[in-house]
């Protein structure tokens, strides 16, 4: 049995994708999709620390329950959008949702043979109340390889 590979006609330094309405980097070029167009204008996969960053952002932005195969994947942060926020309560709820989501991500990635793609430790998590309807959390996680990534999420009306 062989693997399926996708390939494009390869002319170095020449974009191979057809023109699209909007910005093509939205689809392939900004590192937010699993499938990217590499420097040789061929398809390549996001991997290593870029994949870890993508995995963290994806689990934080996914509404819990929307993935039927993994019903506990994601957070309930979306339900807080538009709600008036009590700063004494909401900060703890946001941090709890992020921590729980990262624990789930660890369970899903712990057997990955690439240690840069395994979220192992939550190093820092800070939460700032921007207004009574907006909160921003910034977090730093450490991959099993020892490399760190810092990302964040904004909950509420921006």
Image (cartoon, helix red, strand yellow):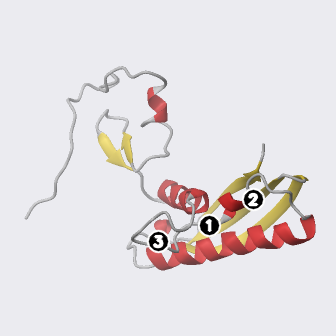
Nearer the observer: mark 1 or 2; the answer is 1
In-image side of 85 versus 77 (left or right): right
Say which residue label 3 marks.
115
- Nearer to the camera, 141 or 19: 19
Residue drawn at point x = 38 percent, y = 42 percent? 36
- Nearer to the camera, 130 or 140: 130
- SS assignment at label 3: helix
Count of numbered circles in the view: 3
Nearer the observer: mark 3 or 2; the answer is 2
Residue 133's place in the image compared with 68, above or below, is: above
Task: Give the image quarter of residue 138.
Answer: bottom right
| Label 3 – label 2 distance at C-alpha | 23 Å
Q: Assess disc 1: are there few (<14), some (14-19) or many (≥20) residues with their C-alpha within 10 Å of its C-alpha.
A: many
Q: Quadrant of the N terminus?
A: bottom left
| Label 3 – label 1 distance at C-alpha | 24 Å
Picture disc at residue 138? 2
- SS assignment at label 1: loop
């Amino acid at each position: 049995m062989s693997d399926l590979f996708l390939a494009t006609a390869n002319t170095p330094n020449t974009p191979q994708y057809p023109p699209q309405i909007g910005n093509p980097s939205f689809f392939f070029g900004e590192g937010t999709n699993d499938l990217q167009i590499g420097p040789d204008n061929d398809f390549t996969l996001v991997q290593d620390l870029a994949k870890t960053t993508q995995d963290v952002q994806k689990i934080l932005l996914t509404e819990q329950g929307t993935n039927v195969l993994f019903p506990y994947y994601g957070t309930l942060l979306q339900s807080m959008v538009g709600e008036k926020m009590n700063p004494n309560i909401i900060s703890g709820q946001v941090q709890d949702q992020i921590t729980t989501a990262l624990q789930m991500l660890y369970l899903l990635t712990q057997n990955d043979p690439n240690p840069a793609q395994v979220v192992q430790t939550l190093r820092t998590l800070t939460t700032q109340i921007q207004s009574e309807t907006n909160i921003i959390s910034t977090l730093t996680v450490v991959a099993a390889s020892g490399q760190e990534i810092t990302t964040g999420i904004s909950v509420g009306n921006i």
